[in-house]
Each structure stands twice: as C-alpha cells, then as structure tokens.
Amino acid sequence: MTLIIGSLQLGFIYAWLALGVTITFRILDIPDLTAEGSFTCGVAISSILSFHGHPFLGILLGIAGGMLAGTVTGLLQTKAGIHPILAGILTMSGLYSVNLFILGGQPNISLLGKTTLFSFFADKLAGIDRNLIKLLIIAVISILAIALLVWFFRTNLGLCIRATGDNEHMVRASSINVDSMKIIALAIANGFIALSGAVLAQYQGFGDINTGVGIIVVGLASVIIGEVFFGRRSLAVSFISALTGSIIYRFIIALALKTDFFPAYGFKLLSAVIVAIALSIPAIQQKWAEHKIKKEGKDRASN
C-alpha cells in the first residue's frame, strides 16, 4: 500500500513537469532543455522560502522563477536567433549558478521541522492520515492545472500558440507575432515545470541543487508513455495522457527499484531505457504493419 500511495503522490507531482514538456514538445514543437534549470529553480525558491516560514509564497515565486527562465530561453531563441536546443542549454547552465545563489551558496537545504504546504494542511486536518492528505492536495492541484491549461489553450491566445506550433509560416502570414507566442508558451511551460520542483521540495523535505539533473528525461518518459496508451488525440486528452503517463512511469520506477535486480543508482539509466523503448514503439508498430502488408501480398500472390 505504501508503494502504491507513494507512486501516486510522486506521479501527480511529476505530472506538472510532464504538462510543461507537453506544451513545448507537442504543442509548440520545440525541443526545450530549460527544464533542468527551471525545475531546480522551483526547488531552490520553494526550499529557501519554506525554510524561512513562507511555504505558499515559495510555491508562487517558484512558479514565477520558472516562467522567468522560460522567458529568457524564449528571448534567446527569438531575439538573439539562437537555436532552441542551444538556448535551452544556455539558460539551464546559467540557472545552476542562480539556483546556487538562491540557496545561499549551499548545495542543499533541509526543511526538517519547518512548515510546508503538506504539514500546514496536516495540522489543520488532524486525525486524517497524512499520506491521504498529501495525495488529496496533489490530486486537486493536478485537476486544477489540467482544467486551467485546457481553458487557456481554447482562448484566442492559446489558439494562436497552438497554430504557431502547427504552422509557423502561416501564422506569420496572418500578422500574428510568432516570437511573442513562443515566449509566452515557453514561460507557461517552465512555470509548470517549476511548480513540480517547488512542490517536490516541500514534499520530500529538502532542496538540492542537483535535483533537476536529467529531469527532462522523466518528463519525456511520462509524455511518451501516456501517448502509448491514449494516442495523440485532442488537447484535453493530451494533458490527461501526460498525467497518466507520469503515474505509470513512477510505478515502473518503483517496481524496478524495489527488486534486487536493479540498484538505486541505476535510476537514470532505467529512465533513459524507458524513454528509448517508448519512443521506438511507433516505429516498431509501423514496421510491423508494413511486414503484415508484405506478408499478405505474398500470400495472395502464391494463391
């Protein structure tokens, strides 16, 4: 039961990371590597403010920090003409120093005995199981996040962002400011990624400068795994798919690490293997379909 509840809790938290990756990777069609920096930015801001007794402000400013990071990446892409991958790497690299500065120059900070989002509600709802409270809080935030994104991407601004990802040249011809659309989308995406980091820091009770290392793989894995089950359909289904994929991914990781076969330090390798397998599934399905067609053709010819 502990394994199930823990996987659900982490699955919901990392789902916000997956939502951010969905915006850049699927809607905007841009490979954004800012995630590692913006995720840790959320961790750093949330940790330091929670340490000083402001957990809610920590989450809000953590989101703001992530949005600022996304804005910087967007400006590097659109105004400086830097390739999207390089722009993300530059922002991510610069954020390492910024995040370390936020943490006061120390690589990690403990929130043991400090008030966090979860301890605050646990104290208010005394008598209810703490793990249940955590799960309820995270689930509510996830539902609100998906509802907010679905609403936003149906507004005129959201439709312009979606159109930019579908056909940038057509959007430019329609006198829509493509640069602004990219910057706004990257800011929103990294805001959600930072939200994931901000809540995770308070959930696990500490913030670490290396928390975001390789986190983009986790986001991609969640998105791809969700698409394997749901396919690429409507916008709302895409967001629900990302959330479901995140939960499934956490269960896979938890089960793999629970066995003696896979050591805990192999987490990153396992994540990379899962993403590689998930990404290769469409190609495998296509080759299998082509093989069946060829086989049916040969059978008809022989008959």
Image: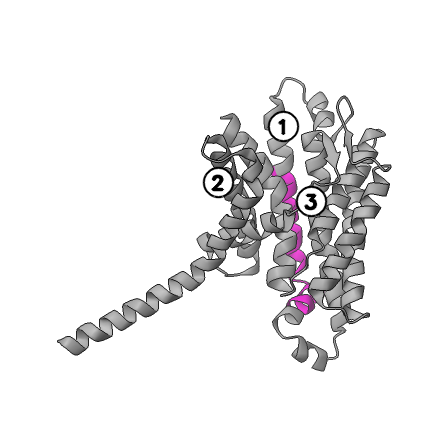
Report the magenta residues as a range: 139-162
Left/right of residue 301 with respect to residue 72 in the rendered view: left
Q: Disc 3 marks which amino acid?
A: Gly
Q: Disc 2 marks which amino acid?
A: Ile
Local crowd size for mark 3, using a 10 Å CA cut-off: few (<14), some (14–19), many (≥20): many
Q: Quadrant of the C terminus?
A: bottom left
Residue lying at the far top in this picture: please name it: 127
Give the image quarter of residue 75: bottom right
Local secondary structure at mark 3? loop
Q: Disc 1 marks which amino acid?
A: Ile
Q: Is residue 175 above or below residue 164?
A: below
The residue identified by callout 2 is 252
Local secondary structure at mark 1? helix
The residue identified by callout 3 is 212
Residue 134: x, y in percent? 63, 30
Residue 155: in magenta span = yes
Local secondary structure at mark 2? helix
The residue identified by callout 1 is 133
